[in-house]
Amino acid sequence: MLELVIISTLNGVQYGMLLFLMASGLTLIFSMMGVLNFAHASFYMLGAFFGFQISRWLGFWPALVIAPVAVGGIGALVERYGLRNVHRHGHVPELLFTFGLAYVIEEVVQMIWGKAPVDFRVPSLLDFPAFTVFATNYPAYKLFMLLTSVAIFVVLFIILRRTRIGLVVQAALTHPHMVAHLGHNVPLVFMSVFGVGTALAAVAGVIAGPALVTQSNMAGLLGPILFVVVVVGGLGSLAGAFAASLLIGLVQTFAVSVNLSMADIFAFAHFTPSPGTIARDVWNVTLAQIAPILPYVLLVLVLVLKPTGLWGTRET
Amino acid sequence: MGRNLLWGLAAAAVMGSILSAKAQETIKVAYIDPLSGGGASTGETGLKTYQFIADQLNAKGGVLGKRIEIVGYDNKLNPQESLIQAQKAIDAGARVITQGNGSAVAAALTDFVAKYNDRNPGKEVLYLNYAAVDPVLTNEKCNYWHFRFDANADIKMEALTNYLKPSTSIKKVYLINQDYSFGQAVRVAARRMLAAKRPDIQIVGDELHPLQKITDFAPYVAKIKASGADTIITGNWDKDISLLLKAAADAGLQVDWYTYYADAPGGPTAIKQTGLNHRVFQVAEGAANIPNAPSQEFERALRAKYDFGLLYPRAVNELRLLAAAIAEAKSTDPLKIAAKLEGMKFTVFDGGEGFMRADDHQFFQPMYIKSFGDLTTNEPFDEEKTGWGWRVVAKVDTPDTILPTVCKMKRPST
């Protein structure tokens, strides 16, 4: 039991930190531009495929640096020549623009790398069990994913809270006009934040690529969860995104390992619906089976009970 | 350079016109399976395999002087999308549909084909199912136009449980399956047959997880580990088995595996990584290392062209049986082909006799239990360059695979 708890906690935190790498960029971009970037998960996918391709040519470690820079560059260009032009027409065109962009990226990825998964392997340097909890091995690569995510979180936090750049970014979040009047180049700040946000998503893509599956629907699989994280944490709140990422990572991992069902909960009352009815089916569904929809249940609950999100200040 | 290019273009144009003239003479078989998203690795391997088999048949002159043409349609593993693709295929002139991945898809397709044929007499469509093995398709939901070439889930579980019955080391079994009709059929069959054959075995877990959506099975493996299971039974296919095995390898899970589809793309690599030498079993209708000259020759030819071995001996059976039925009927009319297919006897790919039972259109053939591990010199084929390959550990002859059916076949009145 203890073994299961420890391993599940590690798995949950690791998945949560991966979510945070993506959610941080998404939530920063939202708080700056007021736009939910539907294509954010697509940049994560681009990161994974760039990482795959570059690691073919130069190896994994160069890929870990080059792929995010390249994707961040693409992100910055998208902001400069796409979003900024659309911005004049209001929020709905912006939303539609990012929505369309997600499809374009998916199609391009399918055109270049095909629709089937590509063979993105864990680098051999990290292909060994890092440590053993009781009798379960914990792969070194997962530990690497966890540590990388934590390191990036710390760096991001320090930059935003402790440096002059962070100060300007934070100010631009809430008072862009004032910041502009003070002589800062606000459009450049916007472009940089968009670029850095997408680069972070790409980092997540490169490190998740070998562990999860690198294929053209990976954006679609992760995208919805990302929005749950951002909304639950509170739109625009970095601390909220951090907490929500961990929460959802842990909830999803732990739910899988719990076999609790309504039948168990009500066992003491000796109440069971008659066999063959829908109620009976519902009765026997375990928490493990509904694990994948739990984040969405959380999303609905948060929107009903606290629409600003757990840490957010603004109405979603 | 420029002149060469010009000649090349001219040659291509001539070839193209020859091909398009010949295209009118083809027998179109629509391959409707996932070619993107979840299940795509298996879907693409299947499509290439079908095209390879068709090429071989065509090289021998085709059927009735016509070429067999395989056309791929991507159904994204979605029942609704499959119906759209089926309609598209029919509109493009296909009268034979083949599909395998996903019994939920198969249930939708068999319904669709039955209705389509009712409404369009004279334009009937055949549905050849090569891998959707939910038993209902040849029982409660049986349909005259549907022919299944893979053994159904019950037949496979019967073979697996008969094989594991004498292993006294098995005490705690963990069931993990995909949460849809097929996965549930596997789980029900496993519970029923284990209870009958080995009542002492304890079922310590009975998991259903979402179909082809999970990218990391680590939480599931942690749970399996905590349950203390010594054996896993799973019907998982494609990424759901290869990623499950990969997560097991990462966590160092040491158990025996009784599977339906451990040979899925990526599966052999993951098994090698687990280090479980001849402890991962699969029930199938064939294996590359069966000492049968014609099938080994086929295997060599396939591997010379692609980097994978034959996952679907049943696909070879399917197309060869289709060709035989067309030749015998002297017609490409599905109505006449179906009449010939019913009850047809056939020497299957890996040797031995099989037959298409007329009562329910289930094909019966010798089944094998094979295990994955190191090979002797008589076993020439390894998988995915691992050095390990499949070895047959038990064979079930055709008569012993026969299970009763509740199908009441409705035949077209002619």
Image (tube, coloured by chain):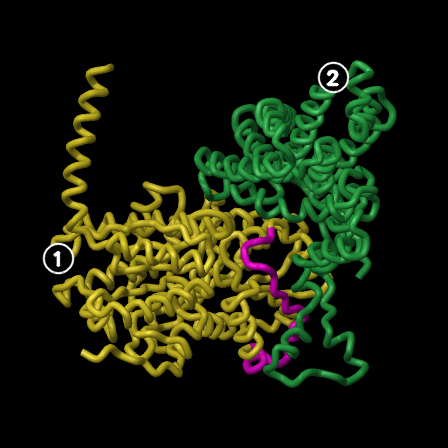
Residue furthest front as drawn: A89
Residue ID for mark 1: B64
Nearer-the-camera pick, A154 or A179? A179
Residue B81 visible to an observer of this rendering: yes
Q: Name the residue rendered at 51%, 72% in the picture.
A: B185
Report whether B42 appears left or right of A94. left
Across and down, in percent, residue B219 comes to: 69, 55
The residue tagged with tag 1: helix, strand or loop? loop
Q: Name the residue rendered at 71%, 26% in the picture.
A: A193
Residue A16 location, quadrant:
top right
Say few, some or many: other residues with alpha carbon within 10 Å of mark 1 (under 14 / 14 to 19 / 20 or more): some
Q: Which residues are magenta?
A: B194-214
Q: Which mark is residue B36?
A: none
Mark-to-mark CA distance, 2 and 1: 75 Å
Nearer-the-camera pick, A97 or A105? A97
Across and down, in percent, residue B328 comes to: 14, 67
Tell me if residue B291 comes above or below residue A170 in the rendering.
below
Identify the subunit bearing mark 1.
Answer: B
**Rendered-image quadrant of the C terminus of chain B:** bottom left
B203 in the magenta segment? yes
Residue type at numbered disc 1:
Leu
Residue ID for mark 2: A185
Shown colour of chain A: green
Nearer-the-camera pick, B325 or B156? B325
The residue tagged with tag 2: helix, strand or loop? loop
Nearer-the-camera pick, B260 or A220? A220
Across and down, in percent, residue B161 comes to: 51, 73
B4 in the magenta segment? no
Shown colour of chain B: yellow
